[in-house]
Image (cartoon, grey):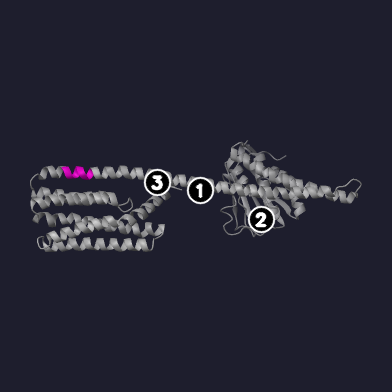
Amino acid sequence: MTESAYRDQVLVNEARTELKGSIAAWVALSTGTAFLAFTFAGRAEPVGFFLWLGAIGVFLAGWLVAWIGFIARPPSDAAILARWIPGAKAGMILCNVATAGSVWVFLPVAEPELRALMLVLLAWFLIIQFAAATEATQVLRPAVVLVLGSLVAWLLVAQPPHFLVLAIFLPLFGATLILIRRFVRQAVVEATTARAAAEAARRELERERDAKTQFIRAASHDLQQPLQAASLFLGRVKPGGRAADQTASLSGVQRSLTVARTLVGAMLDHLKLESGAVRADMATFLAGDLFERVLLTQGPAAADAGVRLSTAGAGVALRADPLLLARAVENLVANAIRHSGGRRVVLGARGRGATATIWVVDDGRGLSAGDEARIFAPFEQGAHVGAAGGFGLGLASTRGLAELMGGECGVRRDLTRGAAFYIRLGAAPAREIPCAA
């Protein structure tokens, strides 16, 4: 999860938690509003008084309606980020503007004792905002500037007793609130981020555990099949039997053991990659050399499956580890033979600018929607899996081998009726291109 995603998740979690409990702050603010309205009704300047009362009333009513709606029908995370948080901020700004204006409405007509109480109420208002508002909805810094700035301005204009001391103290009080809020916020973010990271790590471990459990089950099943088949074929081999029957049975044993060896080899390759035991020994060679090796190893399986292998671009120079690249391409070709359901597989190479790309293209049934995003993950397979089965490790190993050589591996569905897998590598420098014999 990215830092931005972590931050959004923190904001959403805070909004859900704080809004449910904010009714206590609403009750406190409503009580203070009722006290001021009752105390200054008929005493304060009417226009300013009703403007203040109307603004605070709209804010409190909107807050209550939003709280009821949130509890009755909790919004989605996207709705909280898009509508609820901006709406809450707008409401807080309205409340702060009204509170800052109330200084000029109430203090001029208040006696000294009531003025002192008003100072306490204004400080209390900021403390409530400090404690109740979330990072998403709080606007503490603007609140301090608006409310305390308005109060200091009135003190300097009206010059009541001790006005200079109060004018110095109030900004210090506001700055202390902002600093404390920043420290608290930093601690909350760090704790929430650490918790989210731990949760993500736990989910990833569970996913890997489930995948490996599934892998063990698949390994037990897939390995048992060729071994059981080999056992059955061996059971048919009897001393003094007919040569034709013996040959067929021994051929079946060979095929079964070849399948088992392929499955075990795929598993071992993946484990070596995961452990970091594989190192790339980079060299420059022609694509034709790669194709010869792949045709040699995959030709028999293609012939048995009735699949025709062909090549193109044999003269393209490649810069890679010959053995690792051959293994990666062999995985792609073997997958096409076993799973594509097609009758032709083309191995191609193309150089363009600073890259060289090896393609393995088949004319089979292609990939299902969404397969491209997951088939390169370990223990994952596409929707169209042939009868040969497998562990879902071939493409994961291919991608790992390509990345080990500084390249990338992927698939495109728009180039052919089937599937077009590719390995893209850095091109060989011109001075290193080998001469064809």
The location of residue 346, given as percent across then percent down, is 69, 52
> Measuring 28% from the left and 60% from the top, which residue is drawn there?
63
- The residue type indicated by label 1 comes to Arg
Residue 273 at least partly seen = yes
Q: Which residue is mark 3?
A: 192
Q: Which residue is mark 1?
A: 203
Up the image or down, 55 lies above or below 391; here it is below
The location of residue 404, given as percent across then percent down, is 59, 40
User: Between marks 2 and 3, how big is the CA–CA gap?
Assistant: 42 Å
Q: Is residue 190 left or right of residue 324?
A: left
Mark drawn on residue 1:
none
- Whether 234 is among the magenta residues is no
User: Element at badge 1?
Assistant: helix
The location of residue 277, given as percent across then percent down, is 61, 36
Q: Which residue is mark 2?
A: 385
Magenta span: 169-175
- Mark 2 and mark 1 lie on one chain; the one further toward the N terminus is 1
- The residue type indicated by label 2 comes to Val
- Whether 171 is among the magenta residues is yes
- Mark 2 and mark 3 lie on one chain; the one further toward the N terminus is 3
Q: Between residues 348 and 245, which one lies in front from this camera angle?
A: 245
Neighbours of disc 3 within 10 Å: few (<14), some (14-19), many (20+): some
Q: Main secondary structure of the magenta part?
A: helix
Residue 423 at least partly seen = no
The location of residue 68, given as percent across then percent down, is 33, 63
Q: Name the quadrant of the C terminus.
A: top right
